[in-house]
Amino acid sequence: MYKRTNLTLLLAALFILFGATALAQETGRTYTRADFVNIDGGSLQEKIDRAVQQFKGTRQGDTVWIAYHFQSRDGIQLGPFSGSVYRDGDGIQLTYRENPDGAAVFFLVDVTGSRPAFTRVKTLNVNEPYLFENRPVYWLGNVDTGQSLAQLETIMRGDPENKDKVRGALRAIGAHNNPRVIPMLKDVALKDKTIDIQRAAITYLARIPAKESLDALDELFAAADSTTIKQAIVGAYTTTGDRVSEKRVLDRLTAIAKSEERIEVRTEAVRKIAGFRGDAIADRLFEIYDRLNDREIKLEILRRVAVSDGTDDRAVKRLTTIAKNDPDLNLQREAINRISIRNDDGITALIDIYNSSNSDSVKVAIINRLAQSQSRKAADKLLAIAREDANPKMRQAAVSKLSNSPITPSVIR
């Protein structure tokens, strides 16, 4: 009798479990844009109130998405593929750009309390086929940017401890086409007590391609005490503006690299300068190199300077000069490591440095570098060192490298 009772209870529990699962499967639903519930009204607040009341009347759950379209600025990037570039070997290219007409703010609203609670803020492009699981979307239509920004600011200020929500609101604010946006983001970056939120405001400020956003970054940099914030601003300089303002950005980063700022900030400036394209970038980096006595910054410049494989590479000439003449051994070795070994010009430069050097450390660095090359000219030089160098240490180093080299020197083929 005892065993039969246990079996009955087990079967009952399984029935309840499977019944609950089936019920959940029946009630679960995925909503598309075609399922959005349209809400009419005057002001944004009136539309939100109507959406909440209408959703409560359906008894469909405790949370709902409330969304609307706002006037967004050109060049926004909302979706996961925005700004992505397709390029193939046949010269075919495609840059994915979003249609700003689809920009929309989505609020996840909890309606269980006496007043609706906004728990999430997302910015999406509704022209994309998003799916919304288990929650309907109440659509408020087009909303004036001024009202939208006021609502976002209220949500952000009302719950400053919810960092995800604040970041979501900042992202949405940055996408609006309104002159209030830059001052709002600048104010958060300047006054918020949390570094993560300050950095988020700086990020979205930097995405606005306008002179005013660069002006704001300059002011924020001057006012900042935190190294972390200054580094964030330096990084932000490279994402704002357009081709017209590129020189201004490069000049600003150059000034920071040469300044008396903390080394972390100046190093970040060097890295960002190196990220720009063009033959003049190497010249700019070496101009900074010549003006400084800071060894760490000089090393960073050598590590970052782009070295092309061209036959008339000014960067290689500068690296050769440093490798030959700089009194700092670490700088000499770093310059050697930056000289290309994929063409004869680079190999010739390394051989020239070896022949003119009196430093064993420099010569060993060159032997190691030549051994990394697939060039027969490099292998021939290693063989010549192994046979003829007056220094037995150099001969031994060259022999060791030749024994592991995949290239056979031409003189012993």
Image (cartoon, rainbow, N blue to C red):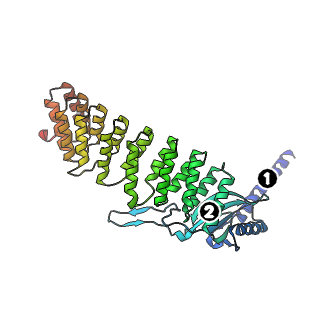
* Position above or below: 66 against 168: below
Residue identifier under label 2: 149
Whether residue 290 is visible here, answered yes or no, is yes
Q: Secondary structure at mark 1?
A: helix
Q: Nearer the viewer, residue 387 or 245?
A: 245
Locate residue 351, reporting x and y percent. Answer: 18, 38
Residue type at numbered disc 2: Leu
Residue 348's image quarter? Answer: top left
Residue at x 53%, y 62% (from the top left corner): 79
Q: Which one is earlier in the sequence, the residue at label 2 or at label 1? A: 1
* Position above or below: 251 against 134: above
Q: How far apart, in angstroms, are the residues tagged by discs 2 and 1?
A: 52 Å
Residue identifier under label 1: 13
* Position above or below: 365 against 129: above
> Is 315 on the left-hand or right-hand side of 80?
left
Q: Secondary structure at mark 2?
A: helix
Residue at x 32%, y 40% (from the top left corner): 291
> Is 174 on the left-hand or right-hand side of 140?
left
Residue at x 43%, y 38% (from the top left corner): 263
Q: Nearer the viewer, residue 187 or 326?
A: 187
- The number of numbered badges drawn on the structure is 2
Using a 10 Å C-alpha cutoff, classify the residue at mark 2 as few (fewer than 14 neighbours), some (14 to 19) or many (20 or more): many
Residue at x 28%, y 39% (from the top left corner): 335
Q: Nearer the viewer, mark 2 or mark 1?
A: 2
Q: Nearer the viewer, residue 38 or 286?
A: 286
Q: Residue furthest top?
A: 392
Q: Residue furthest right?
A: 1
Residue type at numbered disc 1: Ala
Locate residue 154, reporting x and y percent. Answer: 67, 58
